[in-house]
Image: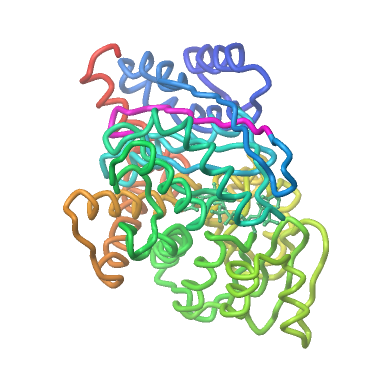
Amino acid sequence: MTELNKQLHYIYDEVLRRNPGEAEFHQAVLEVLSSLGPVVAKHPQYTSVIQRMCEPERQIIFRVPWVDDAGNVQINRGFRVEFNSALGPFKGGLRFHPSVYIGIIKFLGFEQIFKNSLTGLPIGGGKGGSDFDPKGRSDGEIMRFCQSFMTELYRHLGEYTDVPAGDIGVGGREIGYLFGQYKRITNRYESGVLTGKGLSWGGSQVRTEATGYGAVFFADEILKTSGDSFEGKRAVVSGSGNVAIYAIEKIHQLGGTVVACSDSSGYVVDEKGIDLDLIKEIKEVKRERIEAYATARGGDTKFVSGRLTWDVPCDVAVPSATQNELTGEDAARLVKAGGKIVAEGANMPCTPDAVKVFAEAGVKFAPGKAANAGGVATSALEMQQNASRDSWSFEYTEQRLATIMRGIHDRCLATADEYGAPGNYVVGANIAGFIQVADAMLAMGVI
Ligand code: NDP
């Protein structure tokens, strides 16, 4: 275990005791606590706040019954963890994936507190989802599931209370069904209650692209610190979902070439650069497996079944699939293959061992809570547009996103400097994210 001082050690032990079996949540808490030693040394008044921050304000677990196409009743479990509302309404996505359980939702909700704080926008942290597996389900089944899910969840939501969005398995289609059911039950057209909406009914330009674009803007800021750019760089992106596709798009726009991407069945290597139109067609329209990309692309493009092992030569890596997908061994391969910058598009895709390998090898590493904050930041911009009944242009919104990402990057670096860890984005992100929430909690008393 990473060295913690006595007080932080006690807090971590309490988290282990109170949340048994929630490995991902333990991992996320330890990652943050490991950065906070210098903060409590300098400001002891924060210690009690840290303990409160590790306990969600509210956790909701509910039954989601629905009827499949064959007429059978199916039962899933729904979750919403409202973690911290010191800075604004709970805000964070919904994940539909069979691996979902309370420990995953709590890790994601906990991360979200600091990420949302880093954006500088007035949003608290939360997360939700279900162990529902959308793969292979018809549109009708997805709709009935979403309607049942919202029939319970709606009572906990509101534009000033809790504002969900998408995550793994929840994209524009699902947000549409969820919003439709919320509107129907409440008889309110409350645009600000969900983000990631369609452009014709309250959505924001750039929200679809925001997480992937934002991660690449962050990596670009890292490159700029040494006078470099994406021009001519090779990159590898894992996943081929929402975050991955738009990370690929932005890297190509900035002059780099993405040569590999993946899904849970395997990965493709395309030395000419991933064909964006083709990957969008296969993943967003046809919802096929990644092998279909290699088949359709032909030539030397190869499909490799099994998990991406990060040994494809590259300068920059943007892991954008899921938690703990890049292990210590993978990190060693990535370093050997030339990787110099890693920006996490996904939440916690690199294991603690991997992060250690990067630190030892001098790889510049941007943690997800900073690098992938562009998604939630643009969700907050969507809320702003909804509140003022306005809609902004693509160019203006993208410029706002780029400015926010630059701000997060600079704040991480400045904070890392201030606390004696120059160039360490992990320390910078954890401390900067923490202090803003902690100050707000202290100001509001013991609540
Ligand atoms: P999508 O569902 O759109 O895509 C997920 C991608 O990752 C798919 O290619 C999927 O493959 C792959 N994947 C998922 N689980 C696994 C697994 N266990 N092993 C291997 N591959 C897997 O999700 P998003 O792109 O929205 O989210 C990706 C990551 O980014 C998540 O960590 C999410 O929390 C994070 N994130 C997302 C944001 C957003 O705005 N969407 C905002 C901030 C962070 P397959 O289809 O085969 O399952």
79 or 359: which is nearer to us?
79
**Residue at left 22%, top 19%?**
444
**Residue at left 56%, top 57%?**
342
Magenta-span inclusion, residue 218: no
Q: How far across and how far down the image is residue 337, in percent?
A: 71, 66
Q: Give the residue at the far right of this rendering.
A: 305
**Residue at left 57%, top 77%?**
276
Q: Quadrant of residue 163?
A: top left
**441 with respect to 366 (left or right):** left
The answer to whether one can see residue 236 in this image is: yes
Q: How far across and how far down the image is residue 168, in percent?
A: 58, 49
Q: Quadrant of residue 234?
A: bottom right
* Residue 440 drawn above or below residue 345: above
Report the magenta residues as a range.
75-89
Q: Quadrant of the C terminus?
A: top left
* Residue 1 drawn above or below residue 125: above
Q: Give the residue at the far left of this rendering.
A: 388
**419 with respect to 334 (left or right):** left
Q: How far across and how far down the image is residue 272, in percent?
A: 66, 84
Magenta-span inclusion, residue 80: yes
**Residue at left 37%, top 21%?**
40
101 or 308: which is nearer to us?
101
Q: How far across and how far down the image is residue 293, in percent?
A: 71, 75
